[in-house]
Image (cartoon, rainbow, N blue to C red):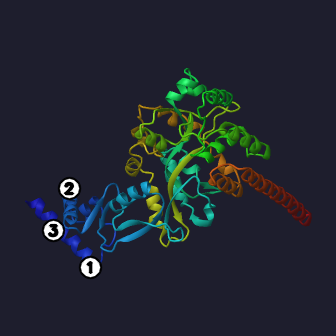
Amino acid sequence: MELSNKSEMIARAIEKKIYDGTYTGKLPSEQAVATEYDTARMTAAKALNLLVTRGLAVRVPFKGTYVKNTEERVIRVMGNEYFFNRLADYVPRRFPGYSVALTKDIDDAELMILTTFTPFEYESRLLPLPDALVERIEKEERHYPLATQLHRRGKHCYGMPALFSPFMLAYDRAAMRRVDPKFVPYELTLDKMFALQKKAASLNIPFISTWSAQESLFYSFLHNISESTPSRKDFQQAFDTFERLTAGDGGKSPLFQMVTRHKAAALQREGYDFDISPIPLINGTRYCALASEGLFVSRDADTPEILFDICEASVMPDFQRILTAGHHAIPIHRDCSLDSIGCPQYRDDFFFAEIPNLTFGRYRIPFPIQREIRFAFGEGALTKEGKEQILQVLDYVENESRRNRSLLRKMHYYTESVTA
């Protein structure tokens, strides 16, 4: 009884401080309350729980107890509904006094849910994440390294991917039994793909789909063909490979199609009988394109601090488990990845096995060229005009780069001469 009275006394004292404005945000910790009122920590915890029961406070796991805010701050978010719906459920519980609302207006958004295929330069729209936040994630060493590498531009990290997936090749089991009964996924090379295509054509089986993930298929070929920043010759070879392997497509049940992990899970739910293969070895290497989704802070946001906190929370275990439930994609947090392994009907382990082969090569390509590739594939097919436009922009960027290097050399010479 004495414990109950002591807790009640402390709760009323804190309640008075809430009403007079002494406490407006985070309340003192259990230990701080116990020290201030010279009592046991269990008594302090009970006092704080009384405030929660009365609707005056909210307890947030791993963060503390907060005064319940009657005037809710609504954060405007632009992005896909899958991610947003989970964020909408999570934010009010993790950040009392805050909620999120979906907007389709990029100029109105404070937070953006973006993918690796975002067609604008980051610095034009986004705020870089604080260095301290990025360092915390890196020091934890519980996240895949691409968490802080994927969306870097120069010295800045603009976003933290919450989930990601390598692109793999899903193949129709029944069709493959007709084309090559002894098919071994990890032995797939580019030459073997050409041989499979020839056999599939003789059986009137469409080879590889071009109605999904065309851009990623092209990037996979491009980065496996080139050893560094792709040249005009590399682009030409990638065009030729892409067109050769996608020639004759037109059926709705191809032998292969490019899929991410969440697309594979969707195919599984639809009853599609398939298995997974890595992309082919080309020149002895296998670099995988990838898709990711993460939170980014708009450059126009009024109060970015809370938005950065939400970005950090998105890569923590509690939200990671919510976001990637149902095999949507691979969590960026390694511990949660273990929870999401296990789709026995197809070779789900291939997605995880190929993580070391992931490449961020598209970011070695200057943004104007990335944009033209996006436009070219956005039209539904890689046309002659699309290829010419990509090569024209490539030539322009390379000429500008040479010109800038020449100017820098001349400026260096001029500066040295004046100094001498």
**Residue identifier under label 1:** 20
Question: How many residues crowd mark 2 within 10 Å: few (<14), some (14–19), many (20+)?
Answer: few
Q: Mark number for residue 42?
A: 2
Amino acid type at mark 3:
Met
Considering the numbered disc 1 on the image, is that residue within a helix, a strand or a loop?
loop
Coordinates of residue 12 in the picture (x, y in percent): 18, 71
C-alpha span from label 2 to label 1: 26 Å
**Residue identifier under label 3:** 9
Q: Mark number for residue 226?
A: none
Considering the numbered disc 2 on the image, is that residue within a helix, a strand or a loop?
helix
Which of the two residues, 219 or 178, is positioned nearer the viewer here? Answer: 178
Considering the numbered disc 3 on the image, is that residue within a helix, a strand or a loop?
helix
Q: Is residue 250 left or right of residue 398?
A: left
Quarter placement of the N terminus: bottom left
Coordinates of residue 332 in the picture (x, y in percent): 48, 46
Using the rendered image of the protein, determine whether residue 119 is visible from the camera's viewpoint.
Answer: yes
Question: How many residues crowd mark 1 within 10 Å: few (<14), some (14–19), many (20+)?
Answer: few
